[in-house]
Structure formats: C-alpha cells, structure tokens
Image (cartoon, rainbow, N blue to C red):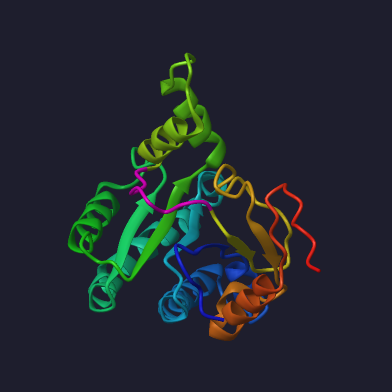
C-alpha cells in the first residue's frame, strides 16, 4: 500500500525487553536492537509515502523503571539522534521530538535541538519521536493554559502542540500500531487518536520490520472509516 495525503502513522514500539530476555540477553540489548529497527521502519515509512510517523520512544511512566535501564535508554536516544540525523537529512526526513524536556539530561536536550534545527527544512516525511511523553499531562497542561471563554478545538490543538514542542501540521493519527501483543494506548496521543484505526500485532518490536509495517498498512486499507457518519448506500 502507498499512503496518500497527510497520512499519519503512530507506533507504540513494545517488546524490546522481552525480545532480549527470550534470548538470554540483558534488556539493554533489546533496546539496542529496537533502535536498529527504528531506522528500518523510518526508511520503509518514507518509501511507503507516509507523511508523519510518530514513535513512542520513552513514556513519562518509564521513569519508574530501574535507574540503570532508564540511563541506558536515554543514552541510546541521544546516540540515535547523533547517528541518524545525517541519514534523515539525506532522505529529507524532518525530526521533531515531542514531550517534556525539563526532566531530560542537558546533553539529550541539546541533541534534540540540534537534530530539529538541522532537519527543519526537510519535507519528505515528518518523524516525531515521543520522549518523556504523557498524553494526559499534555492535555491537562494545555487546559491549564487555555481560556474557558469560547475556546475552540482548533485553538486547543494549538496549545497542545505548544506543550508538546510539536511542529504544526502533523494532523490526527490515521493508524495506531502497537507491537508486542498488548492492546492498550498507554497514555499515547489520546487526543490525536480520537478516530485512529488501531492495529495490534504479537510481533515484538525488534522483529517487526518492513513486512510488519506493510501488513498493518494493508489491514488499514481494508478498514471502513466513517468518523461517526453513515455512508450513502450505493445502488
């Protein structure tokens, strides 16, 4: 399937730790393998014509994991930005990190800002990486900043984007994919996924690959999206 228009895919990349444990490896090895899969899926998404790809890399709840795993994840994210920004430039992929930045290490924040600046002119695809992200926190913070007098959904979405450091134009999520067998949203893009089609797969993230992406896109192509309306019957 080749996506058309401003097609937005979001992925909850679940299963790195289990992938490692099943092989007798430390969980950190699963995260390293998962980062390699990110590169493949980003490139496959650009080839498929996806205009916006949002990846759930580190949730606000992940701070509750053991400190060594958290530190390893944050270092891996910084290394990913350092190594992949040039690749994104070559493929005209714009990087935008969404989520809080006030709790991140200073080196990671600098890497985020550097990647966003270097790729700001890229137009082929928007790659959004959610780091220290909580949809509930974002919605509550946007509501706190909002005026209660005649606030429209559009104005609220602008505030929500400001809270998340999100570059305008991502649009609502069309397809939400979750790997790893779990079937929940886990505080990810709750506003954006209001009418998203949901696709769950047993494949662990390091095993997902381009074939897994195309299976999800093919499944999406067979969905009947009505957005609460009744479609006219054909004769």
Residue at figure coordinates x 45%, y 53% from the top left: 130
- Above or below residue 131? Residue 205 is below
Asked whether the viewer can see residue 66, the reply is yes
Residue 51: image location, x then y, percent: 42, 66
Position above or below: 39 against 143: below
Whether 81 is drawn above or below 113: the answer is below
Residue in view at x 48 percent, y 27 percent: 152
* Residue 148 horizontal side relative to residue 119, left or right: right
Q: Position of residue 195 (x, y in %)?
A: 64, 51
Percent of width and height locating residue 18: 65, 70
Residue at position x 43%, y 51% in the image: 131
The residue lying toward the viewer, choosing from 102 and 139, is 139
**Nearer to us in this view, 134 or 235:** 235
Quadrant that contains the C terminus: bottom right
Would you say residue 167 sits in the magenta stretch?
yes
The reply to whether residue 208 is in sight is no
Residue at (28, 67) in percent of width and height: 123
Left or right of 114 in this view: 9: right
Q: Is residue 92 above or below residue 139?
A: below
Rendered-image quadrant of the N terminus:
bottom right
Res. 219 image quadrant: bottom right
79 within the magenta span: no
Specify start and end residues of the magenta stretch as a single range.
165-172
Residue, far bottom: 211
Question: Splitting the image into 4 quarters, where does residue 43 fall?
Answer: bottom left
Total marks placed: 0
Q: What kind of secondary structure does the magenta stretch mostly adopt? A: loop
Which quarter of the picture shows residue 102?
top left
Q: Residue furthest top?
A: 149
Image coordinates of residue 218 in percent, x first then y, are 65, 79
């Amino acid at each position: 399937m080749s996506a058309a228009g401003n097609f937005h895919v979001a992925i909850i990349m679940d299963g790195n730790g289990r992938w490692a444990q099943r092989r007798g490896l430390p969980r950190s090895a699963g995260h390293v393998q998962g980062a390699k899969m990110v590169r493949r899926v980003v490139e496959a998404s650009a080839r498929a014509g996806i205009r916006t790809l949002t990846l759930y890399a580190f949730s606000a709840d992940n701070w509750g994991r053991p400190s060594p795993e958290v530190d390893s994840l944050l270092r891996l994210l910084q290394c990913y930005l350092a190594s992949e920004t040039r690749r994104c430039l070559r493929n005209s992929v714009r990087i935008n990190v969404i989520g809080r930045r006030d709790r991140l290490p200073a080196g990671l924040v600098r890497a985020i800002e550097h990647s966003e600046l270097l790729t700001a002119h890229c137009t082929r695809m928007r790659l959004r990486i959610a780091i220290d992200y909580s949809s509930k926190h974002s919605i509550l913070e946007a509501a706190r900043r909002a005026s209660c007098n005649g606030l429209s959904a559009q104005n609220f979405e602008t505030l929500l984007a400001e809270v998340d450091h999100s570059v305008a134009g991502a649009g609502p999520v069309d397809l939400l994919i979750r790997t790893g067998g779990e079937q929940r949203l886990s505080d990810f893009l709750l506003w954006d996924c209001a009418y998203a089609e949901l696709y769950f797969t047993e494949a662990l993230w390091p095993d997902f690959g381009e074939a897994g992406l195309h299976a999800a896109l093919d499944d999406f192509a067979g969905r009947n999206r009505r957005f609460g309306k009744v479609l006219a019957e054909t004769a």
